[in-house]
Image: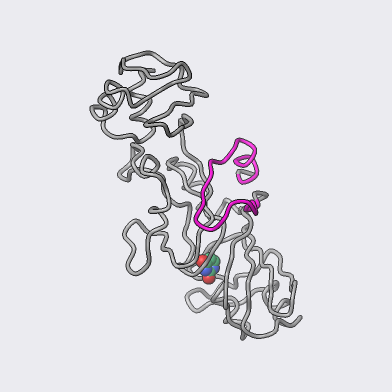
Amino acid sequence: MQLQDILYSQGFGTRRVCAGLIQQGFVSLDDGAVTDAAMEVEAAGLRFRVQGVEWPYHERAYLMLHKPAGTECSQKPSTYPSIYTLLPAPLRQRPQKGPVQGVQAVGRLDQDTTGLLLLTDDGKFIHRMSSPRHHVPKVYEVTAKHPIDEAQVQKLLQGVVLDDDPKPVRAAACEAVGEHHLRLTLTEGKYHQVKRMLAAVGNRVEALHRSQIGALVLPPALLPGQWCWLSAEDLAKISG
Ligand code: URA
């Protein structure tokens, strides 16, 4: 693949901008700076540097972000900063075949919810992960306003009715891990589902954190606001 096409595919700008970056000596490979924009390079496994910053080539981008509180999962946020401002420009600019550009969040978390959020530029992956038939369990750590009792845990496991749907929604797993700390596993993702389920059993969510999707656990070293690429093993953990 030509080096200029590689840069373009990774979100470094239009083909012209990418060619310019190379011709001006801003791009280097293992052997040093290169200036031939049309140079043929093996893309798989390539690590290149643009203005000194190393970038690993990824045909498709799959990432995890530790979403901090006070951020919106929208490209056009209404009140709080967008999570997309936490990502480097190339990830936001990656060309995509569909109508949207760059990586997109796989589902959404509320502005005050923290924790594990996946992002990708693979539309099929988003579709698959968001499909109701694809029951990937998601684990939430809930800080509840009122003490959690066994009756609440049982109701959440048996199913509660939310206002917009007569069909009860139930937790796949539910465990009180502290007087005010509940660990709840859901396999679906309705709007404000955890908050509405807690309200339905007479409690209230004070803080909400997503700690796990499938077998993928948010790494403790990934601090709020930080992101990292997903490895092949990480992907296997969520694809089931
Ligand atoms: N359920 C909620 O209520 N909010 C979230 O952000 C995620 C799940």
Report whether 150 appears left or right of 75.
right
Picture colour scheme: one colour
Q: Quadrant of the C terminus?
A: top right
Magenta region: which residues?
A: 217-238
Question: In which quadrant of the rendered view does residue 148 lie?
Answer: bottom right
What residue sits 63% from the left and 79% below the top? Answer: 144
Of residues 97 and 227, the one nearer the viewer is 227
Q: Residue furthest left?
A: 16
| In the image, residue 187 above or below residue 166 | above
Q: Position of residue 42 (x, y in %)?
A: 46, 17
What residue sits 38% from the left and 53% below the top? Answer: 85
Q: Please state the total of marks drawn on the protein image.
A: 0
Report whether 106 appears left or right of 149.
left
> Is residue 52 part of the magenta span, yes or no?
no
Question: In which quadrant of the rendered view does residue 22 lie?
Answer: top left
Report whether 141 appears left or right of 40.
right
| In the image, residue 198 above or below residue 190 | below
What residue sits 65% from the left and 52% below the top? Answer: 217
What residue sits 53% from the left and 62% below the top? Answer: 189
Of residues 169 and 146, the one nearer the viewer is 146
Q: Position of residue 96 (x, y in %)?
A: 35, 38
Q: Position of residue 221 (x, y in %)?
A: 63, 51
> Is residue 232 part of the magenta span, yes or no?
yes
Of residues 23 and 68, the one nearer the viewer is 23
